[in-house]
Amino acid sequence: MRAAPFALLRNTRKTERGASQFLSRLVVRAAPFALLSILLLALGGLPFLLWGVFFRVTVGLHATWMVNSLTHFWGSRRFATRDASRNNWFVAMLSFGEGWHNNHHANPTSARHGLAWYEIDMHWWEIRLLQIIGLATSVRRASLPFKLQPPVTASTNAEV
Ligand SMILES: [Zn+2]
């Protein structure tokens, strides 16, 4: 009987801490959007706010979701994977390279999805840049003809 009030107190503190963490995460995540919204509203009114925040976020979300929906229905298949994944250039352009989905399914640990020279993969360019300046390490990448390269580490970089 004596432990129950303390347990209740502990649970209350846990709940309060959880709520506090939730609120702080919400503020941290929402603050940039709120500041951008206020700035755009001040600069150009409602049209700036609609195009600069709501339209941009909507396009970004749909492009992301297209990677796991459209690229399993439409596009070409370079690799005979056991799923229905396909390379779709339209989705790749909207998603900065994620639309080379068949390449990704065939080489899931590869940071590079666009394998051919004409498969534009802007995310790979970003990762490559981070690797060059030393902020990304152990980056795996596939290339054509298909061969998954071992991860490049600082020690293997020095040998090359
Ligand atoms: Zn998929």
Image: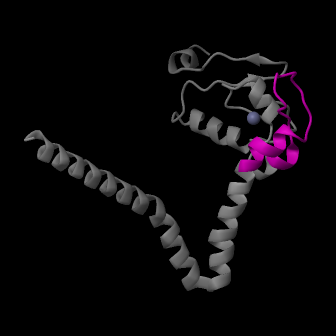
When the figure is inspected, residue 32 is found, relative to residue 145, above or below; the finding is below
Q: Quadrant of the N terminus?
A: top left
Name the one closer to the observer, 135 or 160. Answer: 135
When the figure is inspected, residue 133 is found, relative to residue 159, above or below; the finding is below
Q: How is the image coloured?
A: one colour
In the shown orientation, is residue 31 left or right of residue 110? Answer: left
Does the magenta run of residues contain 68? yes
Regarding residue 97, the answer to whether it shows in the image is: no
Name the one closer to the observer, 3 or 84. Answer: 3
Regarding residue 27, the answer to whether it shows in the image is: yes
Residue lying at 69% horizontally and 74% vertically, measured from the top left: 51
Does the magenta run of residues contain 61? no
Where is residue 139 drawn, in percent x and y? 60, 26
Name the one closer to the observer, 84 or 76. Answer: 84
Q: Quadrant of the C terminus?
A: top right
Where is residue 65 drawn, in percent x and y? 72, 49
Residue lying at 64% horizontally and 24% vertically, measured from the top left: 140
In the shown orientation, is residue 131 left or right of residue 101? Answer: left
Instruction: State which region is magenta.
Output: 65-91
